[in-house]
Protein backbone atom coordinates (compact mmCIF):
# COMPACT_ATOMS: atom_id res chain seq x y z
CA UNK A 1 0.00 0.00 0.00
CA UNK A 2 1.33 3.47 -0.87
CA UNK A 3 2.09 5.61 2.18
CA UNK A 4 0.40 9.02 2.01
CA UNK A 5 2.89 11.81 2.77
CA UNK A 6 1.69 14.38 5.33
CA UNK A 7 0.77 17.74 3.85
CA UNK A 8 3.02 20.60 5.00
CA UNK A 9 2.43 24.35 4.73
CA UNK A 10 5.39 26.50 5.85
CA UNK A 11 5.20 30.05 7.12
CA UNK A 12 8.46 31.90 7.76
CA UNK A 13 9.35 35.49 8.56
CA UNK A 14 10.92 37.84 11.10
CA UNK A 15 9.81 38.34 14.71
CA UNK A 16 6.51 40.10 15.26
CA UNK A 17 5.23 39.85 11.67
CA UNK A 18 2.06 38.01 12.73
CA UNK A 19 3.08 34.49 11.66
CA UNK A 20 1.53 32.80 14.70
CA UNK A 21 -1.92 34.28 14.25
CA UNK A 22 -1.94 33.61 10.52
CA UNK A 23 -0.53 30.07 10.91
CA UNK A 24 -3.11 29.18 13.56
CA UNK A 25 -5.97 30.50 11.46
CA UNK A 26 -4.78 28.53 8.43
CA UNK A 27 -4.35 25.40 10.55
CA UNK A 28 -7.87 25.92 11.84
CA UNK A 29 -9.32 26.45 8.35
CA UNK A 30 -7.58 23.46 6.75
CA UNK A 31 -7.91 21.28 9.88
CA UNK A 32 -4.18 20.73 10.25
CA UNK A 33 -1.91 20.66 13.29
CA UNK A 34 -0.03 23.86 14.09
CA UNK A 35 3.70 23.65 14.82
CA UNK A 36 5.25 26.73 16.47
CA UNK A 37 9.00 26.12 16.03
CA UNK A 38 9.83 29.42 17.76
CA UNK A 39 8.26 27.84 20.86
CA UNK A 40 10.73 24.95 20.50
CA UNK A 41 13.72 27.34 20.41
CA UNK A 42 12.24 29.29 23.33
CA UNK A 43 11.58 26.13 25.37
CA UNK A 44 15.21 25.03 24.81
CA UNK A 45 16.41 28.51 25.85
CA UNK A 46 14.35 28.46 29.03
CA UNK A 47 15.41 24.90 29.80
CA UNK A 48 19.15 25.53 29.33
CA UNK A 49 19.15 29.08 30.72
CA UNK A 50 21.04 32.30 30.21
CA UNK A 51 24.54 31.92 28.75
CA UNK A 52 23.95 28.38 27.44
CA UNK A 53 24.59 29.65 23.90
CA UNK A 54 28.28 29.95 24.85
CA UNK A 55 28.62 26.37 26.18
CA UNK A 56 31.18 24.05 24.55
CA UNK A 57 29.83 21.79 21.80
CA UNK A 58 29.81 18.54 23.82
CA UNK A 59 28.12 20.08 26.85
CA UNK A 60 25.46 21.64 24.66
CA UNK A 61 24.82 18.37 22.79
CA UNK A 62 24.55 16.39 26.04
CA UNK A 63 22.02 18.88 27.42
CA UNK A 64 20.03 18.90 24.16
CA UNK A 65 19.79 15.11 24.15
CA UNK A 66 17.82 15.35 27.39
CA UNK A 67 15.14 17.54 25.80
CA UNK A 68 12.34 15.68 24.00
CA UNK A 69 9.59 17.30 21.99
CA UNK A 70 6.38 15.62 21.09
CA UNK A 71 3.31 16.78 19.23
CA UNK A 72 0.53 15.01 21.09
CA UNK A 73 -2.81 14.55 19.37
CA UNK A 74 -3.93 15.15 15.80
CA UNK A 75 -5.01 18.16 13.77
CA UNK A 76 -6.38 21.11 15.70
CA UNK A 77 -6.14 19.25 18.99
CA UNK A 78 -2.38 18.66 18.62
CA UNK A 79 -0.30 20.17 21.43
CA UNK A 80 3.46 20.50 21.69
CA UNK A 81 5.06 19.10 24.82
CA UNK A 82 8.64 19.22 26.09
CA UNK A 83 9.64 16.27 28.26
CA UNK A 84 5.94 15.44 28.55
CA UNK A 85 5.04 18.88 29.93
CA UNK A 86 2.83 21.36 28.12
CA UNK A 87 4.81 24.46 27.07
CA UNK A 88 3.44 27.46 28.99
CA UNK A 89 3.41 31.24 28.72
CA UNK A 90 6.75 31.55 30.54
CA UNK A 91 8.56 31.11 27.19
CA UNK A 92 6.92 34.28 25.84
CA UNK A 93 9.07 36.82 27.71
CA UNK A 94 10.98 39.12 25.31
CA UNK A 95 14.20 38.11 27.08
CA UNK A 96 13.59 34.42 26.35
CA UNK A 97 13.07 35.35 22.68
CA UNK A 98 16.49 36.94 22.63
CA UNK A 99 18.10 33.91 24.32
CA UNK A 100 16.36 31.70 21.73
CA UNK A 101 17.82 33.84 18.97
CA UNK A 102 21.33 33.48 20.49
CA UNK A 103 20.89 29.69 20.74
CA UNK A 104 19.55 29.60 17.18
CA UNK A 105 23.02 30.58 16.01
CA UNK A 106 24.50 27.33 17.29
CA UNK A 107 24.56 24.58 14.63
CA UNK A 108 24.12 21.92 17.36
CA UNK A 109 20.80 23.46 18.41
CA UNK A 110 19.58 23.93 14.83
CA UNK A 111 20.48 20.35 13.93
CA UNK A 112 18.80 18.96 16.99
CA UNK A 113 15.60 20.92 16.46
CA UNK A 114 15.57 20.28 12.72
CA UNK A 115 15.55 16.54 13.41
CA UNK A 116 12.79 16.93 16.00
CA UNK A 117 10.72 19.06 13.58
CA UNK A 118 11.19 16.68 10.65
CA UNK A 119 10.23 13.74 12.85
CA UNK A 120 6.99 15.52 13.79
CA UNK A 121 6.34 16.47 10.14
CA UNK A 122 6.90 12.90 8.97
CA UNK A 123 3.87 11.76 10.95
CA UNK A 124 1.49 14.72 10.97
CA UNK A 125 0.11 17.17 8.41
CA UNK A 126 1.12 20.63 9.59
CA UNK A 127 1.23 24.36 9.29
CA UNK A 128 4.84 24.88 10.43
CA UNK A 129 5.83 28.36 11.49
CA UNK A 130 9.37 29.68 12.03
CA UNK A 131 12.43 31.11 10.28
CA UNK A 132 13.75 28.26 8.13
CA UNK A 133 10.77 25.98 7.64
CA UNK A 134 10.54 26.35 3.85
CA UNK A 135 14.25 26.82 3.21
CA UNK A 136 15.83 24.12 5.41
CA UNK A 137 13.50 21.94 7.48
CA UNK A 138 10.71 21.14 4.98
CA UNK A 139 12.20 21.93 1.55
CA UNK A 140 9.62 19.67 -0.12
CA UNK A 141 6.61 21.38 1.53
CA UNK A 142 3.61 21.80 -0.76
CA UNK A 143 3.06 25.45 0.12
CA UNK A 144 5.69 27.93 1.31
CA UNK A 145 5.08 31.48 2.47
CA UNK A 146 7.36 34.20 3.79
CA UNK A 147 5.75 37.13 5.59
CA UNK A 148 7.59 40.41 5.98
CA UNK A 149 6.95 43.93 7.34
CA UNK A 150 9.07 46.90 8.46
CA UNK A 151 10.56 46.70 11.98
CA UNK A 152 8.50 49.75 13.04
CA UNK A 153 5.23 48.13 11.97
CA UNK A 154 6.14 44.82 13.64
CA UNK A 155 7.06 46.60 16.89
CA UNK A 156 3.75 48.51 16.74
CA UNK A 157 1.83 45.20 16.36
CA UNK A 158 3.73 43.61 19.25
CA UNK A 159 3.07 46.71 21.39
CA UNK A 160 -0.67 46.53 20.65
CA UNK A 161 -0.68 42.82 21.53
CA UNK A 162 1.14 43.32 24.84
CA UNK A 163 -0.87 46.33 25.97
CA UNK A 164 -4.12 44.53 25.06
CA UNK A 165 -2.99 41.82 27.51
CA UNK A 166 -2.45 44.50 30.14
CA UNK A 167 1.35 44.16 29.98
CA UNK A 168 3.64 47.18 30.14
CA UNK A 169 5.58 47.77 26.93
CA UNK A 170 7.71 50.56 25.54
CA UNK A 171 7.53 50.99 21.75
CA UNK A 172 11.12 52.28 21.47
CA UNK A 173 12.54 49.32 23.40
CA UNK A 174 10.44 46.84 21.40
CA UNK A 175 11.66 48.34 18.09
CA UNK A 176 15.29 48.20 19.25
CA UNK A 177 14.97 44.58 20.45
CA UNK A 178 13.27 43.51 17.22
CA UNK A 179 16.05 45.07 15.14
CA UNK A 180 18.65 43.29 17.25
CA UNK A 181 16.90 39.96 16.82
CA UNK A 182 16.41 40.59 13.05
CA UNK A 183 20.07 41.30 12.63
CA UNK A 184 21.02 38.14 14.49
CA UNK A 185 18.45 35.93 12.69
CA UNK A 186 19.30 37.28 9.22
CA UNK A 187 23.07 37.22 9.57
CA UNK A 188 23.76 33.92 11.30
CA UNK A 189 25.91 31.50 9.31
CA UNK A 190 23.57 28.48 9.69
CA UNK A 191 20.06 28.66 8.21
CA UNK A 192 19.78 32.47 8.18
CA UNK A 193 16.34 34.01 8.01
CA UNK A 194 15.49 34.37 4.32
CA UNK A 195 12.75 33.20 2.00
CA UNK A 196 13.14 29.82 0.29
CA UNK A 197 13.67 30.42 -3.46
CA UNK A 198 10.21 28.95 -4.15
CA UNK A 199 8.41 30.71 -1.28
CA UNK A 200 5.61 33.17 -1.93
CA UNK A 201 6.71 36.44 -0.24
CA UNK A 202 4.02 38.72 1.21
CA UNK A 203 4.85 42.22 2.44
CA UNK A 204 2.27 42.72 5.18
CA UNK A 205 3.28 46.28 6.19
CA UNK A 206 0.07 47.73 4.77
CA UNK A 207 -2.21 44.73 5.29
CA UNK A 208 -4.11 43.64 8.36
CA UNK A 209 -3.87 40.02 9.51
CA UNK A 210 -7.30 39.16 8.12
CA UNK A 211 -6.22 40.33 4.67
CA UNK A 212 -3.02 38.29 4.94
CA UNK A 213 -4.96 35.17 5.97
CA UNK A 214 -7.38 35.56 3.08
CA UNK A 215 -4.57 36.03 0.60
CA UNK A 216 -2.75 32.88 1.76
CA UNK A 217 -5.92 30.84 1.90
CA UNK A 218 -6.78 31.79 -1.68
CA UNK A 219 -3.28 30.93 -2.89
CA UNK A 220 -3.46 27.51 -1.20
CA UNK A 221 -6.90 26.78 -2.61
CA UNK A 222 -5.86 27.88 -6.11
CA UNK A 223 -2.79 25.63 -6.07
CA UNK A 224 -4.88 22.76 -4.76
O1 LIG B 1 9.23 33.04 16.49
P1 LIG B 1 9.81 33.42 17.87
O2 LIG B 1 9.95 34.89 18.07
O3 LIG B 1 9.06 32.76 18.97
O4 LIG B 1 11.30 32.80 17.85
C1 LIG B 1 12.24 33.06 18.85
C2 LIG B 1 13.65 32.95 18.29
O5 LIG B 1 13.94 31.59 17.96
C3 LIG B 1 13.93 33.73 17.00
O6 LIG B 1 14.43 35.03 17.23
C4 LIG B 1 14.97 32.91 16.30
C5 LIG B 1 14.74 31.50 16.81
N1 LIG B 1 14.08 30.67 15.80
C6 LIG B 1 14.86 30.16 14.80
O7 LIG B 1 16.06 30.44 14.75
N2 LIG B 1 14.31 29.30 13.89
C7 LIG B 1 13.01 28.98 13.93
N3 LIG B 1 12.50 28.13 13.03
C8 LIG B 1 12.18 29.54 14.93
C9 LIG B 1 12.74 30.40 15.86
Image (cartoon, rainbow, N blue to C red):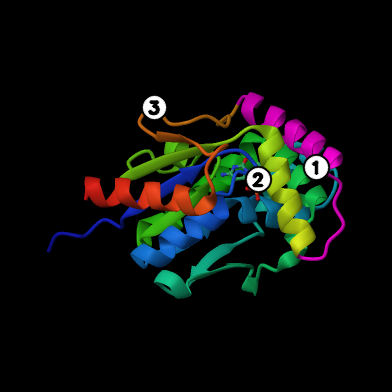
Which secondary structure, mark 1? Answer: helix
Distance between mark 3 and mark 1 Cα atoms: 30 Å
Q: Judge whether residue 63 can be spotted in this image.
A: no
Q: Are the residues tagged 1 and 2 within 8 Å (C-beta)?
A: yes
Name the image quarter holding residue 122: bottom left
Give the magenta part as a residue range.
165-189
Residue 108 in picture, x, y percent from top left: 63, 39
Label 2 residue near ligand 1, CB within 8 Å: yes
Residue 172 in picture, x, y percent from top left: 85, 38
Query: What numbered label is drawn on residue 197?
Result: 3
Residue at numbered disc 2: 16
Magenta span has 183? yes
Which secondary structure, mark 3? Answer: loop
Residue nearest the observer in this picture, 185 or 68: 185
Residue at numbered disc 1: 174
Magenta span has 100? no
Amino acid sequence: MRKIRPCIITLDGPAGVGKSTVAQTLADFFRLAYLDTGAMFRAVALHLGEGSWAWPEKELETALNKIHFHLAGQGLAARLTVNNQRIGQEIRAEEVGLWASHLGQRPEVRDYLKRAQQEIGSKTSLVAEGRDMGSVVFPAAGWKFFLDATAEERARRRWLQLTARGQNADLGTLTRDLRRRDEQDRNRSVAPLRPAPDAYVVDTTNLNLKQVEEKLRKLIQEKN
